[in-house]
Amino acid sequence: MEDGYEEGMVTGVVFVDLSAAYDTVNHRRLLSKILETTRDTRLTELIERMLENRHFFVDLGGKKSRWRRLRNGLPQGSVLAPLLFNIYTNDQPKSADTRRFIYADDLGIGAQATDFKVVEDRLSNALAELTPYYEENHLRANPSKTQVCAFHLRNREAKRQLKVSWSGTSLEHCEHPVYLGVTLDRCLSFKTHTEKTKCKVNARNNIIRKLTGTTWGANPQTLKSTALALCYSAAEYACPV
């Protein structure tokens, strides 16, 4: 994007949304891709043991359903889940006219050109190539929640929206998309992200302040640990950006 700024170009990015991404991962396809990637049968068998024989039931109002077996999906909250999803989608089609930014189910597709229309066409074509891939791999694309944003320094065209469609649905143009917890903007000033972080930290500071009574409050060590966990973690996130 910064190179585009220097060269007077427009960078368009589509932030792809998948419905229940982790829950729709097909185990057989995943294991096949792991074996193809690692060539390690023992590792593949270990992951297979982790995924198989996972059962669940629903308890609603004291009434329990019968046990069901999970035949698809990754264990949510597991540290391995994002890595396994990366392997699962590593073979998705790529276009020479676009660049992809991906971590687990957070996918951004970028295209750069001097003309808005060229950027729109490249992004629409890249999404069209993704559709059959998602269908083949049992992933459900969600065009209604997929967003697109334009990054450039052309102030006269600051309100210009990218017109990109996917599977017959016009994508929402978002001026401040959030990617991996970072709020972006057209000029990458990060002003909106800074304001959000400020509000988040202030809210958490106010909570901690309620615990600082001199006679009944928490001890200093507890307050320090709480501040590090709640405030510093939020303030320092994405600081290198």
Image (cartoon, rainbow, N blue to C red):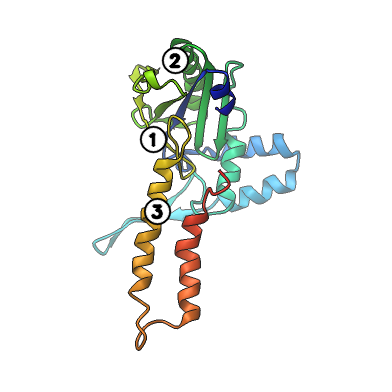
Q: Tell me which label, 1 or 2, sits earlier in the chain.
A: 2
Of the two numbered discs 1 and 2 in the rendering, the one whose residue sits closer to the viewer: 1
Three-letter amino acid code at the position of disc 3: Lys
Three-letter amino acid code at the position of disc 1: His
Q: Are dots 2 and 3 in contact, CB under 8 Å?
A: no
Where is the N terminus found, in terms of image quarters? top right
Q: Where's residue 181, x and y in %?
A: 46, 45
- Judging from the image, what secondary structure is the residue with disc 3 in? helix
Q: Tell me which label, 2 or 3, sits earlier in the chain.
A: 2
Of the two numbered discs 2 and 3 in the rendering, the one whose residue sits closer to the viewer: 3
Q: Nearer the viewer, residue 219 or 79?
A: 219
Give the residue at x 44% y 15%. 120
Where is the C terminus found, in terms of image quarters? top right
Q: Tell me which label, 3 or 1, sits earlier in the chain.
A: 1
How far is disc 2 from disc 3 in space, using C-alphas? 34 Å
Give the residue at x 50% y 38%. 105
Q: Nearer the viewer, residue 23 or 107?
A: 107
Which numbered marker is on residue 176?
1
Give the residue at x 61% y 16%. 96
Q: Where's residue 13, x and y in %?
A: 48, 26
